[in-house]
Structures are given as structure tokens and as C-alpha cells.
């Protein structure tokens, strides 16, 4: 497998936070995490992980991760060492900081964007 090939995920590698689940406090994730519930507090995901905030998710938190995908609602600042993606259904009120930031047509965004590797790592 070449280093440019996307990793293959097994079901056992994915953590699900279901709709109706509410987590508050300092929340740490690794691997791939899909969130449909509510997160509140300080959210961190490990290097090499992907945090997916699904369209039904509601997050009021400072988020620090490697790759963050936002399909739902986020109120708070988001920093990523690799990439932040806000889909057409994503709604973000807060600042984004990552070397790569993608905001799709139709997304709602109210904040500032910083796209430098130094800014993403310094906010962790």
C-alpha cells in the first residue's frame, strides 16, 4: 500500500456517539469518531485520527484534532493539524485554524480562518 492511499477503516476502528447521547467535560478521542449527539467542553482527538461531527451533532466546545469534518453545528473554535472540512450542512460559529480549510457552498460560517501550520499546532 502506498503512503498516498487513503487508510481503510474497519468497523472496530470507528467510535460512534449516537443521537441522544450527551458528553460534557474534557473529551479525548483516537482513531475515527463519528458524533451524532451533543458534545460540550474541551474536545481533543489524537494525531492521525478523524473526528466527524455528523449533521445531527451539536457541539459547544473548543476542538483540537488532526482531521475534523463538520456536518453539524459547532459553537467554539476548531483547530486541526492536518485539515478542517465544513460541509454544505455544517454550521460553525467560531474560528478555524488549520493548514488546510475547506468550507463548502451552503455552509454557515461566522468567524475567522487561519491557514498556517504554525497556528494550528500552537493552539493545541
Image: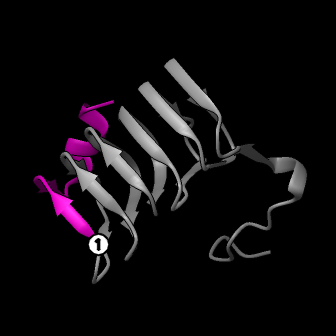
The percent position of residue 43, horizontal first and vertical second, equals 46, 30
Q: Range of the magenta residues?
A: 107-124
Q: Is residue 8 above or below residue 51?
A: below
Residue drawn at 39 percent across, 48 percent down: 81
Q: Is residue 122 magenta?
A: yes
Residue 27, quarter of picture: top right
Residue 79, quarter of picture: top left
Image quadrant where one finds the N terminus: bottom right
The percent position of residue 86, horizontal first and vertical second, equals 36, 66
Q: Which residue is mark 1?
A: 107
The percent position of residue 39, horizontal first and vertical second, equals 49, 33
Name the residue at the top extreme: 25
Q: Nearer the viewer, residue 65 or 119?
A: 65
Is 120 left, or right, of 33 in this rendering?
left
Residue drawn at 26 percent across, 32 percent down: 123
Mark 1: which secondary structure?
loop
Residue drawn at 64 percent across, 39 percent down: 20
Name the residue at the front extreme: 20
Q: Is residue 37 above or below residue 98?
A: above
Is 10 left, or right, of 15 in this rendering?
right
Is 81 left, or right, of 114 in this rendering?
right
The percent position of residue 62, horizontal first and vertical second, equals 33, 32
Q: Nearer the viewer, residue 44 or 87?
A: 87
Q: Nearer the viewer, residue 23 or 29?
A: 23
Q: How many marks?
A: 1
Number of other residues with Cα within 10 Å of mark 1, as a class: few under 14, some 14 to 19, many 20 or more? some
Which scheme is used to colour this image of the protein? Answer: one colour
Image quadrant where one finds the C terminus: top left
Q: Is residue 114 magenta?
A: yes
Residue drawn at 82 percent across, 49 percent down: 13
Q: Is residue 44 above or below residue 35?
A: above
Amino acid at each position: 500500500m502506498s503512503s498516498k492511499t487513503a487508510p481503510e477503516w474497519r468497523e472496530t476502528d470507528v467510535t460512534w456517539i449516537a443521537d441522544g447521547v450527551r458528553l460534557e467535560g474534557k473529551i479525548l478521542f483516537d482513531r475515527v469518531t463519528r458524533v451524532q449527539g451533543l458534545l460540550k467542553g474541551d474536545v481533543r482527538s489524537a494525531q492521525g485520527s478523524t473526528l466527524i461531527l455528523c449533521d445531527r451533532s451539536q457541539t459547544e466546545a473548543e476542538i483540537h484534532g488532526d482531521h475534523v469534518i463538520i456536518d453539524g453545528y459547532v459553537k467554539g473554535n476548531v483547530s486541526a493539524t492536518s485539515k478542517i472540512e465544513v460541509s454544505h450542512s455544517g454550521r460553525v460559529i467560531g474560528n478555524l485554524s488549520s493548514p488546510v480549510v475547506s468550507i463548502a457552498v451552503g455552509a454557515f460560517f461566522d468567524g475567522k480562518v487561519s491557514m498556517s501550520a504554525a497556528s494550528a499546532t500552537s493552539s493545541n
